[in-house]
Image: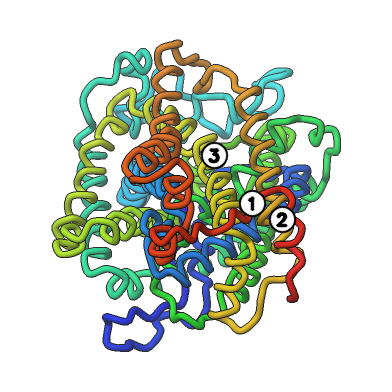
Amino acid sequence: LLLASMLPFEHTTLKKLNKIFHSPFPFLALQVLQCLIILFPGAFLIPYILFLIIAGMPLFYMELALGQYNREGAATVWKICPVFKGVGYAVILIALYVGFYYNVIIAWSLYYLFSSFTFELPWTNCDNSWNSPNCTDPKLFNASVLGNGTKYSKYKLTPAAEFYERGVLHLHESRGIHDLGLPRWQLSLCLLVVVIILFFSLWKGVKTSGKVVWITATLPYVVLFVLLIHGITLPGAYNGINAYLHIDFRRLKEATVWIDAATQIFYSLGAGFGVLIAFASYNKFDNNCYRDALLTSTINCVTSFISGFAIFSILGYMAHEHKVKIEDVATEGAGLVFILYPEAISTLSGSTFWAVVFFIMLLTLGIDSSMGGMEAVITGLADDFQILKQHRKLFTFGVSFGTFLLALFCITNGGIYVLTLLDTFAAGTSILFAVLMEAIGVSWFYGVDRFSEDIQQMMGFKPGLYWRLCWKFVSPAFLLFVVIVSIINFKPLTYDDYTFPLWANRIGWGIALSSMILVPAYIIYKFMNVRGTFKERLAYCITPENEHQLVAQGNVRQFKWIPLQVCGSLFLPA
């Protein structure tokens, strides 16, 4: 999970401060980390780019314009169509769920960083207290030792694998999600440090976080560039890059490739988490968010592509070192970041330096991304409840340390199972559903024509036909399709060879539904709590709050989502 960072902004209550950012580049920070965690096969880039064009860019643009025009957080922005306020609460809850476990991954990075300050990296040998008797020197691995059909990435007896699973996670002391154990004190301290950093980065709002993000957003790109240059000079790097650029069109027949690409779009751009709306609400009213959307989305995609070279050059190097195929080395998920990359770094000259640099990059990326998610929660609720806005520092403290307490479940012996459960259900189908309802609320109920007029007031021009078509038809249809397919293709959750019990899957779906149910629940609540006839109630629910006096006078606004008026609302002069 991503989240975004900052756009150019200028808050009216900050005495007309100069814009802290002159470009939207910090939004890109999350993408690098995701590229390192999710393996990008060549075939994946085709649906990724397609979905970027038909859904990612349009919805990114929509959220920026929505937040900038209304100058509200994810919940109160729905004053444009009050009945959809549940969508705002849903995305805030999703961002909060992600914060529970995302900070744990940052804590792992901090633990690895502390462990790197040694002359000999602790994941290079089998002489440590956490190693099992079966731990084997990776130099002894080759194709003949592994045997046919055995992937190197699945061989769990390397020092790097044992450091991660036994030294950091202590996974060997848990039998499953039913046997969590107590939080590990070392990881608890790392998690506490992360939360303290986040709190002091957020306690004064964007005035503070805007300064912090200059470091957290730029440093990773410097490090990524250094790792890329060094990676392509390693022996075997060419083979890895060759494998990266090879497109296996047979994989495009797999539904999971398309679902993963769709989900990754929203993680990488930050759409649907309330982050874009929250930060865009601090923009100047006439800021060119259209330019920001195009530029950021494009650079995001390019960053994804370039990051693949850094990843696959290392994979090629590892395959060359152990005389195995690229696909036998390749892995995805945390194994790439916390097992293969550290192991590859340990074989380089000056390995301590490279390890410190790499984990500083992960740490700053994680903090930058987590700041965005927590800001979405804080801004979204503070804008809705004045008492929280009046005591913002105390509220920020509560959110920060509330996530710390709940994240303790993820740093127990079996914490990786809790983290996997949250990562799968908290922001999977639910985030796609939330974005779908957001697109419907803005395009079909508030109206594409009204939304286009709002954009014209800000920037002096209306969105083109392409954007209006995507907002009203293409993006909602795409999201609906992906939501349905993801539910149909759901398989019981697993982690490596461990299959989650049925009750755990039910809890997972309960977590997913807890945010999704807020949308229909608020619709019912809103409808039941307004007075008048059925038509007047409906009008109050879907009419912008600044037009409610017209409803009270009996002048009920015409519903612009009636099928006969759909085409007419689309073909507006650009």
Q: Position of residue 367 (x, y in %)?
A: 36, 57
Is 215 in front, or is 329? 215
In the image, farthest residue toward the right: 249
Q: Which of marks 3 and 1 is nearer the N terminus?
A: 3
Is 355 in front, or is 411? 411
Q: Which residue is drawn at 54% across and 47% down?
A: 435
Inter-mark Cα distance, 2 to 1:
7 Å
Q: Position of residue 303 (x, y in %)?
A: 63, 62
Q: Which amino acid does label 3 sit on?
A: Phe
The residue mark sitting in front, 2 or 3, is 2
Which of the 4 quarters of the picture holds residue 138? Answer: top right
Q: Residue at x 57, y 62 (%)?
A: 62
Inter-mark Cα distance, 2 to 3:
26 Å
Relative to residue 95, is residue 70 depicted above or below?
A: below
Q: In this view, does 435 lie to the left or right of 173?
A: right
Q: Mark 3 points at which residue?
A: 433
- Quadrant in which the C terminus appears: bottom right
Inter-mark Cα distance, 3 to 1:
20 Å
Q: Position of residue 516 (x, y in %)?
A: 45, 35
Asked whether disc 3 touches disc 1, contact meaning CB atoms under 8 Å apart, the reply is: no
Is 241 in front, or is 219? 219
Rendered image: mark on residue 565: 2
Relative to residue 47, is residue 446 depicted above or below?
A: below
Q: Name the residue under label 1.
A: 561
Rendered image: mark on residue 206: none
